[in-house]
Image (spheres, rainbow, N blue to C red):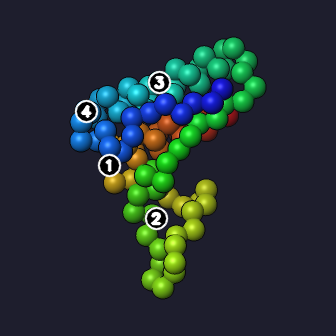
Amino acid sequence: MIHCATLHKPHVATHSERAFLRANVEAVQALLAASLAERVQAFVLTSTTSAFGAALRPAPGAPAAWITEEVRAVPRNVYGVTKGMAEDLAHLYA
């Protein structure tokens, strides 16, 4: 299963927080549960740098921030928050 559907950052201005939760969290949970029930071999969930938000600021003098699994996400809007929540759900189902 490859899941790429989502409300994106431009939708922050036009959609409610509830809409983001439904599309970016609840839908992912439903797909994960269905994939588990159907014994799907692999589930690919696309993410976004928006989940990291302020963590993407490079250190002084550095050309860019290096993001690894150890970097704590610091989202700046509901899009980043809900994408992070979806990632957390995917880890629970892994």
Sooner in the amino-acid sequence: mark 2 or mark 4? 4
Cα distance between the residues tagged 2 and 4: 25 Å
State the mark number for residue 1: none
Mark pair 1, 2: CA separation? 14 Å
Q: Which residue is mark 4?
A: 16
Which residue is denoted by mark 1 in the rendering? 77
Question: At 57% from the left edge and 68% from the top edge, which residue is drawn?
Answer: 66
**Crowding at mark 3 (Cα within 10 Å: few <14, some 14-19, many 20+):** some
Image position, residue 6 (x, y; %): 44, 33
Question: Pointer 1: residues within 10 angstroms few (<14), some, or many (20+)?
Answer: some
CA distance for labels 1 and 4: 12 Å
In this rendering, position of residue 33 left or right of residue 75 = right
User: Are the two marked residues, 1 and 4, in contact with CB atoms closer than 8 angstroms?
Assistant: no
Task: Inspect the image, locate mark 4, and give the three-letter code of the amino acid beneath it.
Answer: Ser
Disc 3 marks a residue whose amino acid type is Ala
Give the quadrant of the N terminus. top right
Mark closest to the chain's N terminus, 3 or 2: 3
Three-letter code, disc 2: Leu
Residue, x 52% and y 25% (percent of image)? 29
Farthest residue toward the top?
38
Q: Which residue is mark 2?
A: 56
Q: Are marks 2 and 4 in contact (CB under 8 Å)?
A: no
Mark 4 and mark 3 lie on one chain; the one further toward the N terminus is 4
Q: Which mark is residue 27?
A: 3
Residue in front for this viewpoint, 12 or 32: 12
Q: Earlier in the sequence, mark 1 or mark 2?
A: 2
Q: Residue at x 63, y 30 (%)?
A: 2
The percent position of residue 39, horizontal first and vertical second, equals 73, 18
Say whether residue 90 is left or right of residue 11. right
